[in-house]
Image (cartoon, coloured by chain):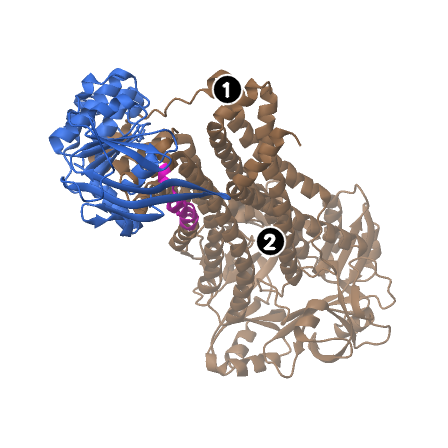
Amino acid sequence: MTEHAAPSPGSGPERAAFRGQDLRKIYQTGETEVHALRGVDLHIPEGEILVLLGPSGSGKSTLLNIIGALDRPTSGTLYYHDTELTALDDTELTRFRRANVGFIFQFYNLIPSLTAEENVRLVTDIADHPMEPAAALELVGLAERRDHYPAQLSGGEQQRVAVARAIAKQPGVLLCDEPTGALDSTTGVRVLETLGQANRELGTTVVIITHNAGIAAMAHRVFHFLDGQIARTVVNENPIDPAEISW
Amino acid sequence: MNALDLKLMRDLWRMRGQALAIALVLAAATATFVLSMGVHRSLTETRDAYYARNHFADVFASMTRAPRAIIDRIAAVPGVSRAEGTIQQYATLDFPDRNVPVRALINSVDEFGRDRLNQVTLREGSMPRPGEAEEIVIDEAFANANELGPGDTIEALIYGTRQQLRIVGVGLAPNYIYALAPGELVPDNNRFGIFWMGEKALEAATDRTEAINHLSLTLDAGASEADVIRRVDTILAPYGGSGAFGREDHFSNAFLENELMQLDAMTQVIPPVFLLVSTFLVYIVLSRMIRTERTQIGLVKAFGYSNWSVGWHYLKFALVIAVLATALGSAAGIWMGRAMTGLYAEYYRFPFLYFRISPAVFLGAAALSVGAASLGALGGMQSAVRLTPAVAMSPPPPPVYRAGFVERFGQAAGFSAIGHMIVRHIARWPGRSAITVLGVALSMALLFATMQFLDSTRTMLDSYFFRAQRQDMSVSFIEARNKDVLFELSQIPGVLRVEPTRAVAVKISHGNKTERSAIESAMTGSQLSARIDSDGSEIDLPSAGLMLSRQLADKLDVRAGDKVSVEMLGGRRTKTMMPVARIVDEFIGDRAYAADTTLETIARDAAPVGAALLRIDPAARDRILTELKDMPIVLGVTERDASMQKFEEVINDNIFTMLFFYISFASAIAVGVVYNSARILFSERVHELATLRVLGYHRSEVGVVLLGELALLVVLSVPFGCFIGYWMAQLMTAMFSSDLFRLPFAPSRASYGWSAVVVLIAAMLTALVVARRVLGLDMVRVLKARE
């Protein structure tokens, strides 16, 4: 692994999925202001796996939400390819999410009244170039469980349905907030393998927030967060296979 | 205040919208209860006080003419405590500037103030004095409508003689709380008044020296009214007695009774609907609240709070709502009660009529509210009481969904994933979905039942005025005439057709049942009158025998083909056995009909014309009225169009008030039910809705999930609303029907449509208010939260 100073946006040799400059986010909670991001510059190359590490409250999730168009920065600019996300209105942000972003959460967030396949269809119904829901489930190894409701699936299976749901629209970017946080190591590894597979086979840019430093080993790049800033960026020349991750 | 009570207060504040929505429905229950009980009580108390103070008689009897001395014989009848005799005489009044006929019923009063029964309460001026033959007292409603008062004079045609009358007083009497001119359906204070005149003066004016034609009696406590009536009838028979009757057959009193009965019916039908809905609402809201507070309940129990104190905590939530509802509803009930009493005061001539309400009514209303809310709360809180702390503090198992039959239907219909979400959620909570459907359906039903009254009244009106009455005018005479009068009338220029008609007072008996009624006849082949069945078809008079209205037939327990005994009252008291040829379903009154030839045979008199029906050239109306006014034999003229217009006015006055109240009430239910369903739905689905937003669904698309389910339920409730409404309207029509009239059940399609539209609009607006919350969804929270 080599350590770099944070690269300036757009300056990298690879084509950037995201470029951000001086991103700041201030939350007003009652009388006090919380500075969640304090001027973040970033460059996320397309087709990489990026891991965000750092203590609670260091700004990882805030950044993920901003990249995922769930939230806006208080100031700064952010580009996805040539689109300036910071200039979009609410409807355009929703359209951007719909077209480009797949989300995976710690608690799966499946709709309990829909079967595995229907949960995937929820996304393919509105996407531009989706895969077949069955194909997405096949990809995560759940083809036979497609007619099961979330309550009939294990935690790992539910998370894999969530992954299938996220990749089914063939998004440009997969954003994962603690995807293995609620899973045991075996199941966690299966989920990570699926993410790796999506990255390899579909060329999807994958951003993962985790508390588990071991996961960083599968990333092409790691941002270490501290106090609302990227303290350092580590580029990993030889990402390992998720199966080899020590939990 | 302990910590749990603090929690209660804050919960109530947090859920104020929902609590208020429930309170609104419960308040509607209280309001209708306070309204109908209060008005009922006010009317009853006012009537009773008025009857007692002015000595309203117990038994009444009319006769053609009897010597004054008969009063002593009547007073001697066992059971009679007091008897008084009077003269009652119709007169036509001459207002120089008006050619419409104005009539008055003149009653004699003792000039020395020795009358006890049916006493006149003077509002202004004084009673007629002895020796002042022209002095009269007029009733207040007539005085107000015609702007008359003491000092004014009126020209009257009494018993064929023109006479100048001077008003010396304005008054009211308990036997004329509700007064109608003969042949009219609703009071017209402009055209009909009640007058009181000195006894000697009226004797002279009607050629009845020391004679009377009317008797009023009071009875001793415990005396049998039926016995007294039998004896009085025997005594009066030679004097053309037309049959004594008790208060229940006294027109004014019967009308008032009818009104009270309708108020009773309202109390029995309307508030229970609201109470039922409130109970359900409290149940679903508390059930949901307890599901979300599962962990807190576990915690509180783990601290050592008993099941009882946890249960009591949630019960108090319901009680606060009930108390609030009682206060709101009572205030609304008082306000509406005042408005309604004001309406009554216009049609009923009471010396005073205030909306008065006793503490018992409030207590009753409070008990009903508290009862309904507690019942709902008890159902909802059972799960809270049963939860053990350990189970409660672990997260609830995820809701289990199954593919049911709806599912297979959905697959067949090619539902989108969103469609599946909606349908499965409804199927997952069948009880709550059913309550939403039922609640909205009840709101629609209530509105429909009210609107059906409009249809019902219009149908009655149409049947009575447009189809049964085809004359332009009906002319009544001082006394029955022979057929020469028809020729005389036909000679008036502009009169196109004249037909005789007649109504004879009779007693009809069948088995041990006897009813006072009238037999009406019309000429064979009449063009100006018809008898209309309740289904709208025209019924011919039977060539022989009687035709009875359904109401009369039911009272006498008579079927077509039976024979009844008919006793003529007044005139020759013949008794004849007659077959009942057929039964006719009618809306107004309980009458009998016979062909003119049949009636002539049993009446055996030479004066078969009681009244004449005229068709006229409209251009000649004024001239014809003037001519009729100058004919001494004419007692009164009723114009069909004017009566109809007056009737419409009265109905519109009442219906408008009623509709306004009921649209508010029905909307209260719809709003209460939809608001609570929507809030519960939103709270259950907030997580899913936010997830959809994260996945890239637009706000409008997410709104569909929330509104789609509500819309489906509300639309589903429309057929149920029609069904329940149909049933409720039928029940209310039956409960509102009386001896005086029977309301037809005649719902129009427009009523179904309008009640659905009003409820759908109320539901839609309410749902949109809740749907606005979709705008404020916090997507980011979803990333973190486990439901």
- Binning the other alpha carbons within 10 Å of mark 1 as few (below 14), some (14 to 19) or many (20 upward) gives some
Image: B465 above or below A15: below
Q: Tell me if B369 is positioned left or right of B280 in this view.
A: right
Mark 1 or mark 2: name the one nearer the start of the chain. 1
- Which of the 4 image quadrants contains residue B526? bottom left
- Spot the brown chain and give its letter: B
Chain at numbered mark 2 = B
Q: Is residue B54 visible?
A: yes
- Which of the 4 image quadrants contains residue B227? top right
Mark 1–mark 2 Cα distance, whole angstroms, equals 69 Å
Give, as a three-letter code, the residue at label 2: Ser
Q: Tell me if B453 is positioned left or right of A185 in this view.
A: right
**Which residue is rendered at x = 85% and y = 68% of the image?**
B111
Q: Which quadrant is home to the N terminus of chain B?
A: top right
Q: Tell me if B724 is positioned left or right of B482 in this view.
A: left
Q: Which is more toward the observer, B618 or B278?
A: B278
Which secondary structure lies at badge 2? strand
Q: Which residue is mark 2?
A: B517
Magenta-drawn stretch, dominant element (helix, strand or loop): helix
Q: Which is more toward the observer, B708 or B695?
A: B695
- Which of the 4 image quadrants contains residue B201? bottom right
Residue contact between numbered discs 1 and 2, judged by CB atoms under 8 Å: no
Image: B448 above or below A150: below
What's the mark number on residue B334?
none
Q: Which residue is mark 1?
A: B387
Q: Which is more toward the observer, B94 or B162?
A: B94
Q: Is residue B743 visible?
A: no
Residue stretch in magenta? B763-780
Magenta span contains residue B114? no
